[in-house]
Amino acid sequence: MNLLLAVLTPFLGAILVAWVSRFGRSHAAWAAGGVALASVAWLLPLLSGPFAGVTLVQRLVWMPSVGLDLVFRLDGLGLLFAGLILGIGLLVILYARYYLSERDSMGRLYAYLLLFMGSMLGVVLSENLIQLLIFWELTSLSSFLLIAYWREREMARTGARMALAVTGAGGLALLGGILLLGQITGSYELSVILASGDLIRAHPLYLPTLILVLLGAFTKSAQFPFHFWLPHAMAAPTPVSAYLHSATMVKAGVFLLARLFPALSGTPEWFWLVGGAGLCTFLLGAITALFKHDLKGLLAYSTISHLGLITLLFGIGTPMAVVAGVFHIINHAIFKASLFMAAGIIDHETGTRDMRRIHGLWQFMPFTATLAMVAAASMAGVPLFNGFLSKEMFFVEAVELASHQSFGWLLLVAVTVAAIFAVAYSLRFIHDVFFSGPPTDLPRVPHEPPRWMKVPVEVLVVLCLLVGIFPAQTVAPLLSVAAAGTLQTALPEYSLAIWHGFTPALWMSVIALVGGVLLYNVRRPLLVWHDRYEDRFDARRVYNALLQGLMAVARWVTGWLDVGSLQRMVFVFVAFALILGWSGWSGSGAVLTGSRPLLPVDGVSLLAALVLMLMSIAVVILHRQRFTALILIGVVGLVVSLIFVKFSAPDLALTQLLVEAVTVVLLLLALYFLPQHSPAESHPLRRSRDALLALLVGGGVGALAWAVLTRPHNSIGDFFLANSVSGGGGSNVVNVILVDFRGFDTLGEITVLALAGLAVYALLETLRLNGPAQDADGRAWNWDMHPVIMASFARLLLPLALLVSVFILLRGHNLPGGGFIAGLVTAVALIMQYLANGVAWTHSRLPVNMHPVIGTGLTIATLTGVGSFVVGYPFLTSTFGHVEWPLVGDFELASAMAFDLGVYLVVVGATLLILVHLGLMHGKESERKTSGRDRGVR
Amino acid sequence: MEALLAVLIGLLTACGVYLALRGRTFPVVLGLTFLSYGVNLFLFSMGRLSIGQPPVINASAVAYADPVPQALVLTAIVIGFAMTAFVIVLALKARADLGNDHVDGQN
């Protein structure tokens, strides 16, 4: 399970780091570094597998019934990416410690960074594609948080939103593509999909699948025409940019291309779509990069360009091109991360990133300048640096491809132009910043950064040189396993030497270098020209127009569907339900009355029914007199509980009785803050219309009830009746169903109850309302709010009532009762105290915060379920046994009783939370009144 | 007896619908309470009616009422209370924020 742990560690670590950060900034950095190292440690023992050519698959069975497992996979490609994510991640963690200022929250950055790290690891180590997609979306979300880290800045927020919108939309397309892949191959697991390339390519759905997957990859990797989000994401802190835009976020798209290469590549569609997008992006990014005055803007477009280069290589699709693509992924990650860090140092030391102001930094920070020069030379593709090697492999592939195509020379021209621009912008990054005269009005006087801030850059720059000079001794083994993992076949022959003789590729490099220097020398008129027309090229305008169009459509649809009146919507809803019910019934030809023998009516039942009818009608007629209506509806509820008594449902009768009491108290408390009368405002016509609809619906429901009641009955209830004692250890079948057979449903229901309680609490917390000073008829409120007799009785009754509730709780498994009913009894008993003695009096004697009670209840109920999970049974399997207690006799203990205790606590907690806080509103109000003006009245 | 219960269920539903269509929050909450009664009884009646046969296993019992709808309705009653509480507090909040108790937020 090492792979699962390696992925989970950063997620858990994020929480740890957020907590640790309160002890100090360095603590947070150490903790984050430790978490990343822990992930490395989980992976280390597995290294031998990929290097021996073995694909490691680790599976955690999750939902076998629907074929859903947590499956992780480690092969060469996954290993390479995991190495980049963790290695550069560690360097970024170190760098960020010195980059962030005192004002910025260290814990937040590291927590987000670790979340992102875990998501990326999940993407590159997933075997199941759906699982991969979940992590893919998590990278979108966590990068949103990272880009918007300086959330007070508007640029950061818009940049983050744009990145999320573009990559999120791509994620949706990718989901579609993955589902299609699953449909075609019958599996979501990579082992199957990668092996069924021929099946996929021959399938009629191949093209839609390809387009959807590519949309996901291109949006993530900022390929043209989705490239525009990446420069705006530069609003992030520089360590974040160094991480996201060198080794991780944008590489996820390229990773996807590499991952699905064996399944999707090798067709003309693949070649034109992937190669075309790659070439456009390569060229466009390189040209734009030269004209950016912002250091990070230049690097952003350079990143876009290099991603285009990698995409183009995958589009070419020969095995050798794939090797070059994988190699360039490594090289780009190394030199781009160091360049971003260098840009961050310059920003940090000078206070600006504008290349029109930063000049001549060589005299202030020669060491940093040297580091940046090495990295930039690598970016330009200068020999002896690592970028040169993969770029030359790329030129070889381009020449090879061009010799087969009729317009191949166009490709060579485009590639050479892009390479010339790459040299020119690299030169600008170095020459403009470190030389080119003295700086112009910098916010601060620059000097070398703190020692440890340079270390990550040094490490990366040394890697640039090592890989560039001794490729065969350093990067070769990793490159070969990663390329083999991508291709899933044997590797082609290739050599990583620096010198291959005077090949066309070498001449292209020479042209690029010379052309780049020349281009840089004539940059000034070009820059002026570009500044004048810059706005016209901004893809953001298209994006904004699209976004606004989408918003307008959404507003139009909402306006069309929602008329903004609850009354009308409810009417339409109910009328529609009526029409549906009627149309279902009228066409079926079924008879209304079934064949089941009927029960005789007795006098008492008839009387109760008459009471219920009279009261209901009275409520409707008198509903504008709210207090009266409330009392009458209480009677209705009591008769309903009598109905349950009559028809063999003692548990329901008890529950209904208690809930009725609680509901009436609740509504009384609330009514105080509402008008005491409803105004007569409905037009008689409207009232008749509503009454007609109500009668029709009531008639329909009544007819339906009649139709069901008169039909013979065949229920799954027999199973529960037969198995209740033997399987659940209780003779009260209703309770056994609740806490045992369907315990999972009950767990969901008490969670809803807890949530409702908390929501009510949250709503009430900020609420300020004033009740009327007099009652509805203009009389003053009775000051004798807590009559002595009632108060005394309530206090005497409390222990008795609590005893009853314990009794009901304990016997619930075998006789009517249980957690729900016992919880309500306790709640009613306690609420009695509040009513009889006042909120302040009771609250001072029962200062119990209900949140922990609810939390404890939910925890107990969940743990009971998890307990059975731990000993190897499905969630919420219960067990029971009998013990002999002195005096009491035989007593049954069931694990379901612990569950019932959880139910009990949640019911008590939620009910009291709701009622007490509503009651406290009265306290708040009378406090304000007495302290406000008429303290002397009493 | 079946006819009597069917009529009651129909009446409770009708009262609930009529009150739910009113323009002020408090009658709407009363209407929802009526609808809860009606729906709970309706769900309960899916197990058909039986008298004196509670679903508590007992050696001398000859038959039992259907326990499944009872279990469903039991939690429905409690959740119905939670919903009523939430809606009425929402009504209070609306009154505080909008200054009136009309369901559409306007006088």
Image: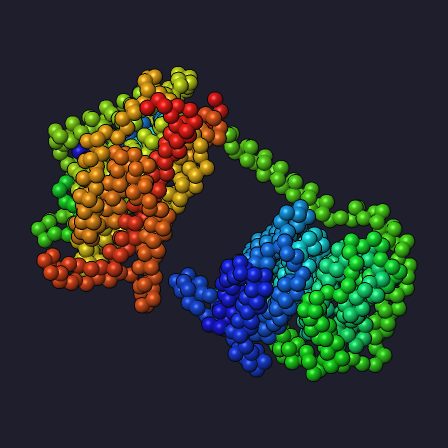
Vertical order, A9 against A660 (above or below): below
Query: Image check: A202 left or right of B69?
Result: right
Query: Image check: B23 left or right of B54?
Result: right
**Quarter occupied by the C terminus of chain A:** top left
Colouring of the image: rainbow
Report the residue at 37% width, 48% height from top.
A851
Which of the 4 image quadrants contains residue A572?
A: top left
Report the residue at 71% width, 45% height from top.
A542
Report the residue at 25% width, 44% height from top.
A826
Which sits in the foreground, A82 or A410? A82
Which of the 4 image quadrants contains residue B8?
A: top left
Pinpoint residue A574: horizontal percent, then vertical percent. 40, 31
Residue A14 appears in the rendering: no
Vertical order, A638 against A813 (above or below): above
Residue extending furthest toward the left: B60
Which sits in the foreground, A522 or A658? A658
Residue extending furthest toward the front: A936
Vertical order, A677 against A123 (above or below): above
Report the residue at 11% width, 57% height from top.
A888
Vertical order, A675 against A530 (above or below): above
Q: How many marks?
A: 0
Pinpoint residue A706: horizontal percent, then vertical percent. 24, 35
Pinpoint residue B102: horizontal percent, then vertical percent. 44, 26
Which sits in the foreground, A159 or A366? A366
Pinpoint residue A256: horizontal percent, then vertical percent. 61, 64
Residue A872 appears in the rendering: yes
Query: Image check: A31 left or right of B101?
Result: right
